[in-house]
Amino acid sequence: DQVIENLDALVNLKNLFLGKNRISKLENLERLEKLELLSIQSNRIVKLEGLEKNRELCHLYISHNGIEQIENLENNIKLETLDLAANRIKHLKNIDHLVNIEEFWFNDNQIESFEEIEVLKHFPKLATVYLANNPIEKNPMYRRKIMMVSPTVTQIDATMCRK
C-alpha cells in the first residue's frame, strides 16, 4: 500500500488528484487547509477520516474504495459534490448537515431502504443524484420517491427528471 506524504509545504494547494495509487488511508492532509477538490478514487480506503482540517473542501471524489460508513465530515460543510459511488455503504448517515450538496453520487453501494434517502431533503441545492445499482433501485417507485423527497433534483442517475 502507498501512503499520502510530503504535502506539508503545499499549504496553498487547491486540487489534489490521487486516483489509482493503492492508498489505504486518508492521512497527512491536515496542512492543506485551502484544499477545494480531493479526488482519491480507485484506492484501498476503508475509512472516511483525516479531512477535519479541510474546511474549504467543495468536491470529494472517493468512489471505488472499500468504505462502509459515512463519517467524520462534520467540518466539511462546504461540500457541493460528494462521490462515494462503488463502496460498501448501507446507510446514508452523518450527512444531513451538508446543506450545500448539489451532486450526490452513491451508485453501486448497498442502500436498501427508502428511509435512507430521506436525508436528501436536507440538501436544498441538490440537482443530481446517482443511486443506480443499489437494492432500492429495483422498486418501481424509485425515481418518484427521490423526486418527492428532493423536489430540486433535475437528474436521477443518467436521466433528466420530468417536472
Image: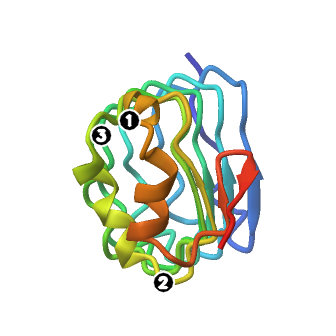
Q: Is residue 113 left or right of residue 83?
A: left
Return the disc, 2 or 3, that comes first in the chain's sequence: 3
Residue type at mark 1 is: Ile
Q: Residue at x 44, y 24 (%)?
A: 66
Report which residue position mark 1 lands on.
136
Q: Is residue 113 visible?
A: yes
Decide which of 154, 76 is in the foreground and name it: 154
Q: Is residue 95 visible?
A: no
Residue named by callout 3: 69
Is residue 35 shown above or below 85? below
Question: Residue drawn at (56%, 73%), measured in percent from left and top?
Answer: 126
Q: Earlier in the sequence, mark 1 or mark 3?
A: 3
How packed mark 2 is, by other alpha carbons closer than 10 Å (few <14, some 14-19, many 20 or more), is some
Look at the picture and state if 4 lies above or below 44. Answer: below
Mark 2 lies on residue: 124
Q: Nearer the viewer, mark 1 or mark 3?
A: 1
Which residue is pictured at 41% across the width and 68% down the height? 148
Residue neighbourhood size for the residue with mark 3, other residues' Cα within 10 Å, grouped as few (<14), some (14–19), many (≥20)? some
Mark 2 or mark 3, whichever is nearer to me: 2
